[in-house]
Image (cartoon, rainbow, N blue to C red):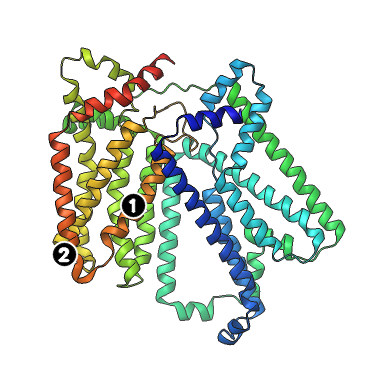
Amino acid sequence: MIYLNWSTFLYRLTNFQTFLMVGYIIFLLILFSNLLGSALVIILFDQNPIVAEQLPWLTVDIHQLIILIFANVLWILHFSFTSTRLLNMEQNRKLLAFAYPVKKLSWHLNLLGFFHPLNVIYNLTWLVFLLMQLHNLMYIPVVIAVVLLNYAFIFSIKHRFLKIVEQRFKIIVFSALFLIFGTIQAIAIISRQFDQIIVHHLPSIKTLNSYLFYTPGGLLQYTATGSYNLATASTIYGFCALLIFLIFRDHFFKTREGLQKSVHKQTTYKRNRLWFYLKKWLGYNAGKFYYYVFSHPYNRLQLLTIALIPAVYIPLLLQLGDNYYSALLIPTMLAAIPVALLAMGMANMFGYENKEFLLHLQFPISFEKQLKERFLGIIVVPLLIFYLITTAEIIYLPQLGSVAGIYISNTFFFVCFTLVFLWTSFYYYKKVDYSSFSFKHPIISQKVTFMMLFLIFGLGYAVFTPLGEYQIYRLWIMGALTIAIAIYLWRDMDLLVRAFDKHVLGNVWANARQ
């Protein structure tokens, strides 16, 4: 199976995908070096005599508090970025028809999930972080078992949490919003009366360390730094080994069940008020497309993420004042909001209701007109959000630049990503599956998501980095490129038909035969 998947991967690999894969590998190496370097610095920096001279307040308890805080931050990052992606279950299910053993296939899929690069990076970071603090060599098997158990718990919890989100989406969303904004308000209240709260309510360092001991990061650290005898170590190791066996056994049976039993949930979309207004204001083709985009549960979670990230980080960046980082990151995040909305609708333009495109030659109106209506309708909502955000920047954040500068920079940012998503909609076509709500197979390709994140920050540096007196030349260049791209798209809209016939139509036929 590994040889078959590797051969298929190499056969379909294009030059641009090779470039993206190399970029992804570099990104993973940078992530691993940053995590590992941070862990080593935090563990060892108290041993430097220069640090001891410059930081006389760094006692043993304070250093322990810093280590515990880092351990919990690392656990939160590990939980957030643990990948639950497996190989495509529908495609791997076909191997069963070729007499591939279902037990072996289920085992291989779980191994592939365990050896995902992100999972390997975080597990190795935990091992190094804990082994560097090891008090006794007999703790090594315990540390290894605890790291494996931590991964197994996170992997299992994330899968079950996603099912809860699917079934109780509104309750989870409103609870998360209440918790996040309540935390932000609490931080704001504490920051205004910081001295009084510190004096009267903050517990001692030893008390904080005792509380943090019961957190996930504290428990993981205790396996390496605690003091316990061989009998206790053997008990902990045996208990962890038993839990690891039971959890991975559950993963194995769930995967085998998913391979043998394909769940097809029939979902009926009724023509409600949303459909009526979308059809009225955006046209039949664009309105119908937007209706399916808004109805998909994955996109609801995407909308929540798009709203929460700026709501959390932009107020924090504003607290930094007028410095280089706030001048760069705030406009980049604000410009990325309509871009993310554009990606939801445009990066997979033909994955919704795709079979109807097989009849496009028999439609009473030209196919070019249908595609133009869909394309223009897709950019209407992100474009409206774009101009609302840009106007708000001009009114409430004048320190970010002049009126013309903000409009030209944001427009160039938006137009560039319009080209990117137009391209990906043809070259990374993916059929949308309504049978289940799953992070493992999102409706936008992982390659597109990685390229989008890479370009957002790369283009953000190119567009929003303060240049002083040279800013005017960059504005002229961006303005000229924006006009050239807009003219090209408007005059050559028939390229949509040619690109669809060349790159998408064959995939639609293939999906229709399934």
Which of the 4 quarters of the picture holds residue 316?
bottom left
Left or right relative to 87: residue 323: left
Secondary structure state at the residue bearing disc 1: helix
- The residue pinned by badge 2 equals 472
Which of the 4 quarters of the picture holds residue 374?
top left
Secondary structure state at the residue bearing disc 2: helix
Between residue 147 and residue 272, name the one nearer to us: 147
State the image coordinates of residue 26 (x, y, percent, origin top left). Answer: 48, 52
**Furthest residue to the top?**
362
Q: Mark 1 belongs to which amino acid?
A: Ile
Is residue 371 visible in the rendered image? The answer is yes
State the image coordinates of residue 461 (x, y, percent, origin top left). Answer: 32, 60
Between residue 309 and residue 196, name the one nearer to us: 309
Between residue 404 and residue 316, name the one nearer to us: 404
State the image coordinates of residue 250 (x, y, percent, origin top left). Answer: 67, 34
Where is 399 relative to 345, above or below?
A: below
